[in-house]
Amino acid sequence: MTRILFYLDEPGKDVWRPAFEAAMPGVDFRDYPDWGSPDDGPAYAFAWEPELGLIAKYSNIVAVFSLGAGVDHITRDTSIPTDLPIIRMSDDGLKEGMAEFVLMTVLMHHRYMPRMMTAQRNHKWQRLFPKRAENVRVGILGYGALGIACADALKPLGYGLAAWSRTAKPAESGIEHFTGPEQFNDFLARTDILVGLLPSTPETTGLLNKDTMGLMPKHASIINVGRGTLVNLDDLVTLLDSGHLAGATLDVFTEEPLNDSDPLWDHEKINITPHIASITRPETAAEYVANNIKKIETGQQPDNVLDRMRGY
Ligand code: NDP
Ligand code: OXD
């Protein structure tokens, strides 16, 4: 019988047990703190932000499934053995959710929706005239599972699309590819609406700062849905206040939840959402975990194992 040790410290988590029971009939699903003893036999952890030290204490864990695509909420715990596989979430539900959110926010920035909403609050009949989509250059930082899903959703609208990644991608119609630090500035210089979809690693931390965002065209916008570590927020505010950048949508922050007294909440050019660009959906995620466990138990390589050298 497969044993799942579940850790999620959020309301509404009761939806997970039935999803796992449907995807893995007979599963022994244990919600923390009911994890039993490390001597109970092999188990898989399925967790979001597990307590520090907890995973290492359960020496019967054979792999840790991240409830999210990012794994920084697990790797922050340095007591986890470095040879324990950590598996990133990459199910269809997560891709669909991110594509919806990015499509919505790109359209909002393209169609000046934040300014329209401010005008409404001020009873102002303010007519603004957006460019045709083909004249708006959208750039996606990170062309992995989620970046690709977002590009696929944006393509039919006709935007000038580009993506930046660490390794080169094969040529593809409808999207221009940029690779590595040497092509980063060119990517920024051609991007009117930037979508941040990078994992948090030492290489991606602080990539968007005064100097780099300053290379973007005047009135460019930033949408950050990857990790908060990507953007230097003081620099972002400076560039918004100077009028160089037009607006920003921020879904992720270095400290979450964002402190309720943080001045970012009231910045008229910033839209804030609480890390909900895409949420992991129980049905598709439980299926994804079940398929990956099947692979492990039949001696195959599971999908999306964290590469600790790359950091994602
Ligand atoms: P993937 O691992 O599939 O893709 C990551 C992409 O980032 C790849 O294209 C990779 O390049 C690129 N990348 C990584 N490091 C660098 C670097 N140093 N320079 C250039 N490119 C780099 O991840 P996902 O698409 O599944 O998820 C991306 C991130 O989105 C997650 O790590 C998570 O932080 C965030 N996320 C946020 C959510 C939210 O609700 N806000 C929900 C889910 C995820 P290459 O292709 O060459 O490997
Ligand atoms: C994440 C997620 O990694 O929610 O942020 O999947």
Image (cartoon, rainbow, N blue to C red):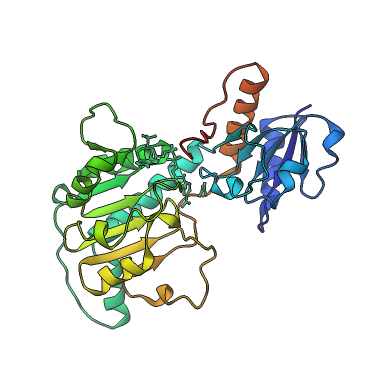
Q: Is residue 145 left or right of residue 293?
A: left
Q: Is residue 69 left or right of residue 266?
A: right
Vertical placement of 177 versus 33: above or below? above
Q: Quadrant of residue 28?
A: top right
Is residue 113 in sight in this rendering? yes
Vertical placement of 249 versus 93: above or below? below
Residue at 32%, 80% in the rendered image: 121
Residue at 29%, 71% in the rendered image: 238
Is residue 115 in sight in this rendering? no
Residue at 59%, 17% in the rendered image: 300
Residue at 46%, 58% in the rendered image: 252
Q: Quadrant of residue 29?
A: top right
Residue 17 position in % (x across, y down): 72, 43
The quarter of the rendering in which ligand 1 is drawn is: top left
- Nearest the eye: 231 or 149: 231
Residue 155 position in % (x across, y down): 25, 40
Q: Residue furthest bottom?
A: 122
Q: Is residue 44 left or right of residue 279?
A: right
Residue 182 position in % (x across, y down): 24, 41
Total marks drawn?
0
Residue 125 position in % (x across, y down): 20, 78
